[in-house]
Image (cartoon, rainbow, N blue to C red):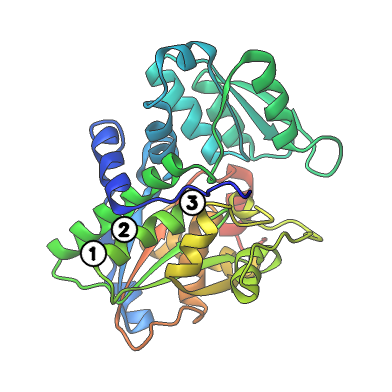
Amino acid sequence: MNAVVPTVGLADIEAAAERIRGHAVETPLIESPALNDRTGLRVLLKCETLQRVGAFKFRGAYNRLVQLNDDERTRGVVAFSSGNHAQGVALAAKLLGIPAVIVMPDDAPSVKVEATKGYGADVRFYNRLSGKTREEIAAEIAQERGAVVVPAFDDPHIVAGQGTVGLEMLRQAHALGATLDVAVAPISGGGLLSGLATTVKAHSPQTAIVGVEPAQFSDTLQSLQKGERVTIKPTGRSYCDALESPFPGEITFPIMRRLVADVALVTDAEVADAMRYAFSTLKLVVEPGGAAGLAALLAGKVSTFGGTTVAIVLSGGNVDPEFFGRVIRGEA
């Protein structure tokens, strides 16, 4: 008999908002006249670049770890991530006094690796292209230590925590006198997008939800087109290291299938253009994956479904300084 896949509802996200209150940052929703002029739309940017650890991932990580019992906290947690989830779990663990081991690819951006170590986590490296997968390594560590595995997206508590982005965004948009026609967020495994979609559609059913993923990691788009989860075999890397999951989550996919209206694909060149625009015009430092939604908008790939007001989640700002310099100079 097939196991029942957990789902996430508005009540779960509202409960998560209470748990993270006073620990996560309520990030600003900003508006740029220059961006409005360029697009001919009213664009609101949810700046999760200013969240603790520089990305939305702290929300879900804290919501998951704060619910561990005393015995689980003593045994610790293990997570696997290219960087932002790693940092989110590492900081949440530090705040809660929980030992944490993080499995990271050996080519992860150094700024993310050093930050993860800086929060006190034990970092274990693996090679993306050979040997055991990060899931296998994390499972072995968890078995050895009796630790709790904290997935990056396929966990209802993680999804609920990420959904708090939507609660804040809707409240802030209302304060600005805006009714959202479209809400846009990047996709890796779908934790952010499914949480955001759950929140936004519950409060604003007319708002269309649009996801964005790298062109060479189009697993969610292919899955939605096929009607079932698809695992892709990428032939290369993306600038968006945070969005390189080869499949949507078991928990997140049914939510996205039900609530997401469209998925846009962006190229590395479009992402680099968006990062330059964010830096030069918006005065924001945004990492490649965090800039995916803005890249899709600037490239004319976001359908507004006849609307004029678009909210975009800038999901993270943890970019390697050397790579960022090349992007800004137009060398990448």
Amino acid at the residue labelled 2: Thr
Instruction: Give the total number of marks visible in the rendering.
Output: 3
Question: Disc 2 and disc 1: Cα gap in Å?
Answer: 7 Å
- What's the residue at 31%, 56% (across, down)? 166
Mark 3 residue crowding within 10 angstroms, few (<14) / some (14–19) / many (20+): many
Judged from this view, the residue extending furthest toward the right is 130
Quadrant of residue 130 within the rendered picture: top right
> Observer-nearest residue: 193 or 202?
202
Q: Mark 3 points at which residue?
A: 191
Judged from this view, the residue extending furthest toward the front is 1
- First in residue order: circle 2 vs circle 3: 3
Question: Disc 3 and disc 1: Cα gap in Å?
Answer: 19 Å
Q: Where is residue 73 in the image (x, y as percent from the top left)?
A: 46, 16
Pointers 3 and 1 in contact (C-beta within 8 Å): no
Label 3: which secondary element: helix
Quadrant of residue 199 within the rendered picture: bottom left
> Observer-nearest residue: 86 or 192?
192
Q: Where is residue 91 in the image (x, y as percent from the top left)?
A: 44, 26
Amino acid at the residue labelled 1: His
Q: Mark 2 points at which residue?
A: 199
Q: Mark 1 points at which residue?
A: 203
Label 1: which secondary element: helix
Quadrant of residue 69 within the rendered picture: top left
Q: Answer left or right for 118 relative to 64.
A: right
